[in-house]
Image (cartoon, rainbow, N blue to C red):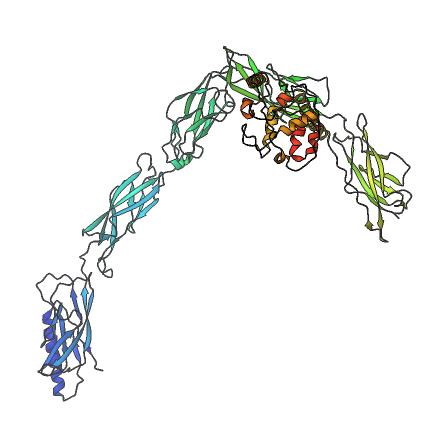
Amino acid sequence: MNHLILLFSLFSAPAFADKESQKTNQNFSSNNASHKRLKRDWIWNQMHIKEEIDTPLPHHVGKITSSVRNNNAKYIIEGEYANTIFKVEETSGDVYAFERLDREKKAEYELTALIIDRRNNQSLEPPSKFIIKVYDINDNVPVFVQKVFNGSVPEMSPVGTSVTKVTAVDADDPTVTGHATVTYQVIKGDEYFTVDDSGVISTTRADLDRENQSTYEIIVKAKDAPGSSGDSSTATVIITLTDINDNFPVFKHPSFHFKVPENISVGGEVGRVKVEDVDEPQHRNTKYSFVRGDYRDTFEIVANPFTNEGIIRPKKPLDFEKVAEYRFDIEATDPTVDLRYFKSGGSRSISTVTIEVTDVDEPPVFTKLPYEFKVRENDPEIRTLGSVWAHDPDAAKRKIRFIRRRASPNGDYIRVSDTGIIQLPKPLDREFSSSYNITVAAQEILEDGRLSDRESHAQVHVIVTDENDNAPELVYPEEPRVCENAAPGKVIIRISATDKDEISPRGFFKYSLATEDSNFSLVENYDNTANITVKYGQFNRELAKIHYLPVIISDNGDPELSSTNTLVISVCKCNDKGNFTFCEERAEQVGVSIQALVAIFICIFTIIAFFAVITLLILLRKRHKKDLSGLGRNVAEIHEQLVTYDEEGGGEMDTTSYDVSVLNSVRKNGIKLEAVPSPYAQVQKPPGNITSGAGEMEMMIEVKKDEADNDRDLLPYDTLHIYGYEGAESTAESLSSLESGSSDSDIDYDFLNDWGPRFKMLAELYGSEPSEDFVY
């Protein structure tokens, strides 16, 4: 590789460069004269140029040259900025800048130098890179990184407390002394703050009070070259004083006045006192206290954490009739104030509070709450337990009426009179309920006699003390059974007892057998239980498969009560191990309560009474006979009986279908005919007609009208149009019982029973009187 020889020259002395060139040429000439072969090398000056040269363009940068001696040699440069910013003179190798350079934009440029033969553009030497460096001049002002800076510091901070830091940057070369050195100075607000060479701003006073001034705006200047009067730049710094708790609250008014009704609830709001605290909300912790006044036990003042107000609340009920006005002094303080920064000379904040109580119509007030009475159960002599009492707290002093509102258990067990006397309508049973509770309401009686709609309530609790009025009862968990070959002393069952009364603290239940004449014995366990055991052993199932053992249980009450309970013990077959193998099943005893028996008897009595009434009505109906003129039976019955026949004939003028002369002859002679089928077809019509007078129809109509007018049980229509009157043209006499019943004929019509089924109805009509009457 070719060796490069660098020759230094001064940019400000181009003549020196020419002299150096001549010297070089002389050296090369002397070398040629000595006939020594030299290696061809690039020869040029290391190039430097100042920025922002104010002489006319182009500016000479330097010179590149080579040891090649060729009249056809040509210098060229290559690179990013070749032939634009920088150009080379092709024969001499001088490099020129055709633009003013700015080091802050680009501090150095890298180019490539070449020497070629202009005839064929062949390289005479390998290319070589070189650098053009731009020398810095102090041509840039320090610039702040931002136009506005923000900082904060607690108020009342000591001198020298750091606030914030500002920064300015100089674009000049920092390696050149004085070119990039930045200094700071507060030019506005220097009486409160200062800044050091590193840009840190700090306080110069210890009395910066946020309540007087919360923000400060200062201006800081930045310049380079200390001691020089070069250019500079400025920036604005906004400093905020943060709050500390250094102020006590102050009442907004020297006194407060409130009105409140006397029925305000305990803990309700009477009013609010307001204070002013110049500190920020997070540093407002006002506490209120009583200074003068005897009502600390009546009111309390609680600070609202959001509004810092003092809320006055009553701690007990107010009474207008007792105290109509309250007056006291209160103080507002803040226990969290930092006393190091407390401003001395401040007065205590005290305000006077006046509370005026207004009168309202209050409900009655009971003198004693709650009320409790004790009474013995089943005591018939006790009818009054005591009384409740309430009074009107207002100045009117109205009379009070008492009313029972609720009861537990529900029922008419306890009564309350209008004057508040607690009464018992009947003795109480502790076993039904050991306590009775009622709610008594008290209402004022207004001047017009009406009851006020405002009422108060009191609870009345009645405790029923126990009397020993219930005998103990037997309790056993399972049906007792015993093996027929059980040994003496074998425990059959363990029994216990319960008592509806309170258990006596004096001892346990006592057990005994009603008779000793059995194969069983009773052993007391002295823990309120007893064992039933086998006395002799060996039961005989052939004689008795079930034994009834009466057990007597008594308590230790006063008086002592006892009961006899029957144990039903089954004798069973058992295997060798004593396990039951066979026992007769007993019919379960079904118990019926007294209430159920009473209900059953009432139902039975009701049914019996119902049937008795029905029977009486039937008998009365039978005794009420319908006495028609000359009729033995009802016309409607006869009509219905006759209508059941399908063969009615053709009417009064039809004398061919039925010949009734035979009936008349038989009736007159008393002859009984033999039952022959269809006798109607064999009878011929006799000569002659039986006439009937016109008065017969009139008589019948009058009779029926009279009957309809006097009989209330008759259906509401005239029976004439359901009764068929045959008229006077028929050869047969009337078959109606109206005429036959009224006649004095003694003919026996029983022979009609022998004429067959077709004459059955006639036989019934004209035969003997039936056992019951028909009604219509």
Does residue 366 appear to the left or right of 352 in the view shown? right
Residue 217 position within the rendered picture, expressed as x and y whole percent measured from the top left: 26, 41
Q: Residue furthest front?
A: 687
Residue 489 position within the rendered picture, expressed as x and y whole percent measured from the top left: 88, 44
Count up the numbered dots. Answer: 0
Is 350 in front, or is 764?
764
Does residue 267 appear to the left or right of 77 in the view shown? right
Q: Residue furthest bottom?
A: 35
Residue 536 position within the rendered picture, expressed as x and y whole percent measured from the top left: 91, 43
Does residue 312 appear to the left or right of 485 in the view shown? left
Residue 511 position within the rendered picture, expressed as x and y whole percent measured from the top left: 84, 35
Is 490 in front, or is 619?
619
Q: Quadrant of residue 604?
A: top right
Quadrant the C terminus occupies: top right
Q: Is residue 306 above or below residue 150?
A: above
Q: Is residue 85 above or below residue 671?
A: below
Does residue 202 appear to the left or right of 256 in the view shown? left
Q: Please indicate, yes or no, whether residue 431 appears anywhere in the rendered image.
A: no
Is 722 in front, or is 486?
722
Quadrant the N terminus occupies: bottom left
Q: Please indicate, yes or no, whether residue 567 appears anywhere in the rendered image.
A: yes
Q: Quadrant of residue 44?
A: bottom left
Q: Is residue 162 above or below residue 69?
A: above
